[in-house]
Image (cartoon, helix red, strand yellow):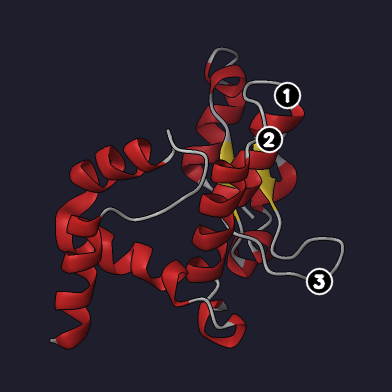
Amino acid sequence: LENPSLDMVYKDDILNKRVQVFDHHEKAIKLGLNKYDFTFIEEVDDHGQKRCATEIFYKYLLDNNYITRSKVLDTFVEFTRLEDTWEWKKEGIPKAHDLAILFNEVGIDKYIELVLENLKDKEFNFTNLEIDLINKKKKE
């Protein structure tokens, strides 16, 4: 199967060394997008747990020593995985879904700013303002 964008990256000696694709969707696997050296596509891990692109990217960064593992990053990545795979409800972790609520309330730029601030702490916690925004939206 062909993907014009990925084929273009594959054929370009500069791009295929600079572009990385991280995905967790079954459709990407069925389309054969994991045939490229620069794609990292995995729907489930070795234990059958659903993956998300954030988690796959985080593992890539850790495995290549670009960052150091931390509790706060582990928590944020797991919350993101729970939300992205819709497992937050089954696991009883509404704080993971709160990430999506916050994202929808503040938009991508502000969300990135807020998350980066949260990642500076030892544990991932929402600020009182973020909690207020989240709770306001939940009441609606």
The amino acid sitting under disc 3 is Gly
Dot 3 surroundings within 10 Å: few (below 14), some, or many (20 or more)?
Answer: few
Q: Which residue is drawn at 27% across and 53% down?
A: 127
Calculate the distance from the C-alpha at mark 3 to the C-alpha at mark 1.
Answer: 24 Å
Give the number of the disc on residue 112. none
Classify the position of the C terminus by image quarter.
bottom left
The x and y percentages for residue 16 are 59, 23
Q: Residues within 10 Å of mark 2 (few under 14, many from 20)?
A: some
Q: Is residue 135 above or below residue 72?
A: below
Indicate the quadrant containing the N terminus: top left, top right, bottom left or bottom right.
bottom right
Which amino acid does the dot numbered 1 rest on?
Answer: Asn
Mark 1 touches mark 2? (CB < 8 Å): yes
Position in image of residue 58 (x %, y %): 62, 40
**Are there few (<14), some (14-19), or many (20+) residues within 10 Å of tag 1?**
few
Q: Compute the Cα span from label 1 to label 2.
A: 6 Å
Secondary element type, mark 3: loop
- Asked if residue 110 is positioned above or below residue 62 in the image, the reply reads below
Residue under numbered circle 3: 48
Dot 1: element: loop
The vertical placement of 90 against 106, above or below, is: below
Q: Which residue is drawn at 33% across and 37% down?
A: 117
Give the residue displayed 18% in from the left and 53% down from the top.
107
Q: Which one is in front, 27 or 80?
A: 80
Side of 96 relative to 22 (left or right): left
Residue 11: x and y in percent read 59, 24
- Which x, y percent locates residue 42? 71, 56
First in sequence: mark 2 vs mark 3: 3
Q: Mark 1 points at which residue?
A: 64
Q: Residue at x 68, y 35 (%)?
A: 60
Residue labelled with disc 2: 60
